[in-house]
Image: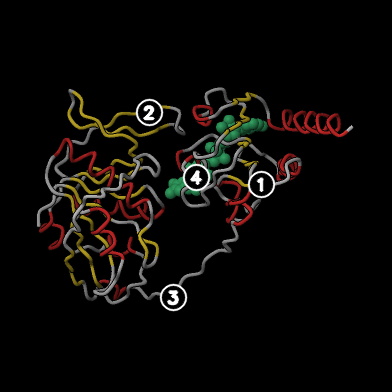
């Protein structure tokens, strides 16, 4: 087994995370320039269903690593992949997702392999310089084209950047196993605790008002509540910094590590538009953004761009909406 491209599947307990199929799309796009085989590396028991499903859906071969504790987060496993396995596989490219897990494991794996590490890949192209990777820099304001010069390169692929294309004609790939006893001797799995996952209000909300780091004072969140209250099916969400500050619960965070929403209207208030946030709301039908920075990346995907301080604009908007509603009712 000597693949050109190795995909490290993103798993959520025993399931395959949807972003894994985006990794497959990215790897197939890379293969157009590199040729060679792609295989997927994942963890699981000998009777696990996930490898079978992945082999069927992608037509790619799967190498499943079996180990004592199936519950162990796979980034620990990845950092401990034995040299024997790595030198046996010897891929030129390793693709992982740009998620907390991928970003945790990718640099460690790159150091272990003396490889380059290119994160946040959004596009793969072939130019006079060879294979190039496009990634967003400076808070997504600028796109940089990067080329790897090492024999091996670890890539993290930005969620939402590569659309999975189901291959109806794919014949299921082969599944093989690699047993790794003792990898977890240094760790004891104490279980995991999930946050409350009541996202039902977000699923049914037609208008979502989302607060970002541009909201400087917790009291100003009241503006978002008042704005949302003007619409019957609405909800208030936020970007990760606001949830990290505990101003909003984590089940209100939109983005790759939060909820994915697709309301009729998404009003982004003081949100810069990082790829991690956008991947959770890009399917909104109509996006309104309020930001003081005319170059904010969120404006690139917005239908209406308002360059203004949110504490100035939102009260005006609320007043205008109330007046409009009162006129219609009278
Ligand atoms: C692995 C990983 C996962 C992540 N997952 C997520 C995720 O799921 N969701 C998420 O949101 N982020 C996530 N992040 C964080 C992400 O990278 C960004 O840091 C985050 O989205 C930035 O949030 P923001 O736009 O609110 O803040 P900032 O980037 O700080 O932007 C604040 C914006 O507010 C504007 N502003 C400032 N003052 C005002 C004002 N008075 N009025 C109007 N505008 C104003 C500024 O111009 C700026 O554009 C993740 C990061 C990593 C590494």
Q: Earlier in the sequence, mark 3 or mark 4?
A: 3
Q: Is mark 4 within 8 Å of ligand 1?
A: yes
At horizontal 51% and vertical 52% (from top left) the residue drawn is 258
On the image, the x and y values in percent for residue 70 come to 32, 73
Residue that carries the numbered disc 2 in the rendered image:
143
Residue 151 horizontal/vertical position (percent): 14, 42
The answer to whether residue 71 is left or right of residue 79 is right
Q: Position of residue 274 (x, y in %)?
A: 48, 38
In the depicted structure, whether residue 221 falls above or below residue 181: above
Image position of 318 with respect to 39: above or below: above
- State the SS at label 4: loop
Quadrant in the rendering for residue 46: bottom left
Q: Determine which of the numbered discs, if any, sits on residue 190 in the image.
A: 3
Give SS at disc 3. Answer: loop
Name the residue carrying label 1. Answer: 236
Q: Which-is-in-front pick, marks 3 and 2?
A: 2
Badge 4: how crowded within 10 Å, few (<14), some, or many (20+)?
many
Q: For the residue labelled by badge 2, is the local secondary structure a helix, a strand or a loop?
A: strand
Nearest to N terminus: mark 3 or mark 1: 3
Q: Quadrant of the N terminus?
A: bottom left
Residue 42, quarter of the rendered image: bottom left
* In this rendering, the label closer to the viewer, 1 or 2: 1
- Residue 280's label in the rendered image is 4
Give the alpha-carbon distance from disc 3 to disc 1, as whole Å: 34 Å
């Amino acid at each position: 087994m000597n693949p050109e491209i190795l995909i490290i599947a993103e798993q959520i307990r025993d399931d395959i995370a949807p972003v894994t199929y985006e990794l497959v799309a990215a790897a197939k796009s890379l293969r157009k320039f590199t040729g060679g085989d792609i295989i997927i590396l994942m963890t699981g028991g000998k009777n696990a269903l996930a490898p079978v499903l992945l082999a069927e859906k992608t037509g790619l071969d799967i190498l499943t690593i079996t180990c004592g504790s199936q519950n162990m987060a796979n980034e620990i496993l990845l950092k401990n992949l034995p040299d024997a396995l790595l030198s046996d596989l010897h891929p030129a490219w390793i693709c992982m997702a740009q998620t907390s897990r991928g970003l945790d494991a990718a640099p460690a794996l790159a150091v272990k392999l003396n490889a380059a590490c290119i994160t946040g890949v959004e596009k793969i192209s072939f130019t006079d310089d060879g294979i190039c990777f496009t990634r967003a820099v400076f808070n997504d304001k600028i796109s940089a084209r990067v080329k790897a010069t090492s024999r091996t390169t670890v890539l993290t692929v930005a969620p939402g950047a590569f659309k999975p294309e189901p291959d109806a004609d794919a014949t299921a790939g082969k599944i093989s196993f690699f047993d790794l006893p003792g990898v977890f001797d240094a760790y004891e799995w104490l279980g995991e605790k999930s946050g409350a996952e009541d996202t039902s209000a977000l699923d049914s909300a037609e208008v979502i008002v989302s607060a970002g780091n541009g909201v400087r004072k917790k009291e100003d969140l009241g503006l978002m509540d008042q704005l949302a209250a003007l619409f019957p099916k609405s909800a208030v969400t936020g970007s990760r910094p606001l949830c990290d500050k505990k101003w909003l619960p984590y089940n209100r965070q939109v983005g790759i590590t939060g909820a994915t929403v697709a309301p009729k209207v998404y009003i982004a208030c003081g949100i810069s538009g990082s790829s991690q946030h956008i991947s959770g709301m890009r399917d909104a039908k109509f996006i309104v953004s309020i930001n003081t920075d005319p170059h904010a990346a969120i404006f690139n995907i917005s239908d209406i761009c308002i360059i203004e301080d949110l504490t100035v604009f939102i009260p005006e908007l609320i007043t205008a909406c109330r007046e409009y509603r009162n006129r219609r009712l009278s």
